[in-house]
């Protein structure tokens, strides 16, 4: 049991350090002037209902990516040549799925002692709720219990626009991601980075961007 506990602990450490791939669909439309020198900008003023601390934290992410591309945020509109806007949304789409109640499906093919089972007869297999129970498995296949569970899929959309101060549209990017991760703050850094990957990119073309997050 002590050796098993050590193995489980080591596996937990390995899993905790694994990265998750965030796969996004990115679509860009732009008329970006190739000779743009002055990249000073201000953010659009959001509606009062949208001006949350979460919204401001994502503006900081956008600002960080723009800084890497040579843009400079200024404090007043009269000092800026560009205006940057951002919108985001998260929609939970629950789906009913059937799930096996026994995660140790390999026990259909192997006995508790690790060798393949042949023939008829009972044996015991470990259930996730902590005990052994007799299980009859003719011809390797026996009755498997299923239960209906709710699986959550989260659709996230991020849109960033860059316009001139006189209203001319210069850059418009939309990032769409669907994943099982519930936390939007955990995913948003990858979505913002995806929006500016290869800036300004090929106009009117959708592409997929894969980024890893810890």
Image (tube, helix red, strand yellow):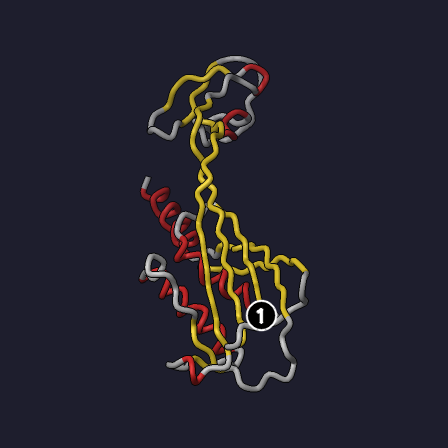
Q: Which residue lies at the image location 36% right of the left edge and 58% below the top edge?
A: 50
Residue 139 position, x and y percent, is 59, 17
Image height of 142 relative to 202, above or below: above
> Where does label 1 land, which residue?
169
Query: Is label 1 in a helix, a strand or a loop?
Result: strand
Q: Residues within 10 Å of mark 1 (few under 14, many from 20)?
A: some
Quarter of the figure with the N terminus: top left
Answer with left or right where residue 120 lies relative to residue 15: right
Residue 77 location in percent, x, y?
42, 79
47 relative to 68 in the view: left or right: left
Horizontal and vertical percent position of residue 141: 56, 19
Q: Quadrant of residue 88?
A: bottom left
Q: Which residue shows up at 40% across the image and 70% down it?
A: 60
Report the label total: 1
In the picture, residue 148 is in which quadrant? top left
Left or right: 153 as drawn, with respect to 198: left
- The residue located at (39%, 57%) in the rendering is 185
Relative vertical location of residue 153 with respect to residue 70 in this rendering, above or below: above
Front-most of 15 and 11?
15
Residue sitting at the far front = 166
Residue 196 position within the rendered picture, expressed as x and y whole percent measured from the top left: 55, 68
Q: Quadrant of the C terminus?
A: bottom left
**Is 168 or 156 nearer to us in this picture?**
168
- In the rendered view, tell whether residue 121 sits above or below residue 117: above
> Camera-side residue: 179 or 140?
179
């Amino acid at each position: 049991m002590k050796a098993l506990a050590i193995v489980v602990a080591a596996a937990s450490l390995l899993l905790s350090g694994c990265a998750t791939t965030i796969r996004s669909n990115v679509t860009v439309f732009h008329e970006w002037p190739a000779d743009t020198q002055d990249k000073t900008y201000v953010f659009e003023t959001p509606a009062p209902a949208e001006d949350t601390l979460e919204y401001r934290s994502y503006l900081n992410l956008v600002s960080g990516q723009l800084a890497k591309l040579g843009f400079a945020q200024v404090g007043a509109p009269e000092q800026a040549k560009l205006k940057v806007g951002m919108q985001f949304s998260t929609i939970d789409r629950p789906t009913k799925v059937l799930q096996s109640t026994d995660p140790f499906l390999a026990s259909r093919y192997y006995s508790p002692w690790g060798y393949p089972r042949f023939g008829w007869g009972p044996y015991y297999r470990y259930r996730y709720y902590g005990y052994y129970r007799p299980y009859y498995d003719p011809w390797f296949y026996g009755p498997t219990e299923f239960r209906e569970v709710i699986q959550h899929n989260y659709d996230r959309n991020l849109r960033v626009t860059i316009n001139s101060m006189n209203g001319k549209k210069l850059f418009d990017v939309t990032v769409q991601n669907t994943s099982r991760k519930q936390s939007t703050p955990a995913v948003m850094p990858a979505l913002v980075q995806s929006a500016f990957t290869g800036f300004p990119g090929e106009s009117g073309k959708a592409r997929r961007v894969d980024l890893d997050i810890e």
